[in-house]
Image (cartoon, rainbow, N blue to C red):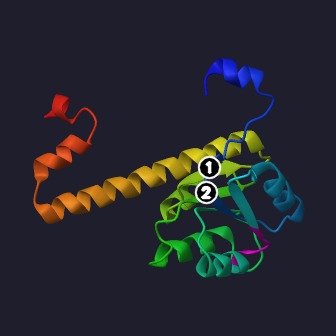
Amino acid sequence: MDIAAVQKSPWSFVLDEPTRVLVADDDPILLEFAVVHLSSPTAVIETAADGAMALSMLKGSRFDIALLDIAMPGLDGFAVLEKIRADIDLRHMPVMMLTGHEDIASIDRAYSLGANSFVTKPVNWRLLSYHIRYVLRTSRMERELCKAHCRIDSAGDAPAMLRLLPNAQAHA
């Protein structure tokens, strides 16, 4: 979409591809805001009130991304993230921490456990939508690159791998 189209359009949806998002937080108001602000004709937002519910939902259905609060009763966001990364079926799903904890220890712990992104509250919902879209896009690109790498490895064609990488010839 060009700038002129954006200026003429009163509203556009950021999450404009089919997307299923799970938002886990013990704050019912935040969950309601998430549904209102992140939903679009192509984006479905589901919510979980605690970590155990989130994990159960993730195991029972397919989601494209999970947004986890750190401070939840029972299983906190860190524990859910650890379980996601340990589960063979979930380990590659993108996970964003959406939390009021913005201290260095929380940030470092989230990334060391495998978080793809870290967003602090209060939430700028429009910016969060773009952030989700970015994380989903990079996750998709990583999966495609891994698939291509596996095909090339099985075919034994190392020069083909270089052709997949941008600017590879300039660095070769």
Toward the viewer: 12 or 93?
Answer: 12
Q: Is residue 16 left or right of residue 30?
A: left
Position in image of residue 12 (x %, y %): 73, 36
Residue 149 in sight here: yes
Q: Secondary structure at mark 1?
A: helix
Find out whether residue 48 is within the magenta segment: yes
Label 1: how many Cα within 10 Å (few below 14, some 14–19, many 20+): many
Q: Is residue 159 above or below residue 111?
A: above
Residue at the image point whose x is 62% and y is 57% from the top: 19
Mark 2: give few (<14), some (14-19) or many (20+) Cα within 10 Å. Answer: many
Residue 69 lies in the magenta-colored region: no
Q: Is residue 129 above or below residue 35?
A: above
**Circle number at residue 96:** 2
- Cβ–Cβ below 8 Å for labels 1 and 2? yes
Residue 135 vertical placement versus 10 (above, below): below
The count of marks equals: 2
User: Residue at position x 77%, y 66% from top?
Assistant: 25
As rendered, which of 14 and 25 lies closer to the eye? 14
Measured in 3D between alpha carbons, the distance from the residue under mark 1 to the one under mark 2, in whole angstroms, is 8 Å
| Amino acid type at image mark 2 | Met
Q: Residue furthest top?
A: 4
Q: Residue 95, located in which quarter of the rendered image?
A: bottom right
Q: Which residues are magenta?
A: 47-51
Location of residue 56 in the rendering, given as x and y in whole percent from the top left corner: 66, 82
User: In the image shown, does 79 or 135 lie closer to the viewer?
Assistant: 135
Query: What secondary structure is found at the residue carrying circle 2?
Result: strand
Amino acid type, residue under disc 1 in the picture: Ile
Reading the chain from its start, which is encountered first: label 1 or label 2?
2
Q: Position of residue 172 (x, y in %)?
A: 13, 34
Is 60 drawn above or below residue 152 in the view shown? below
Q: Which residue is mark 1?
A: 132
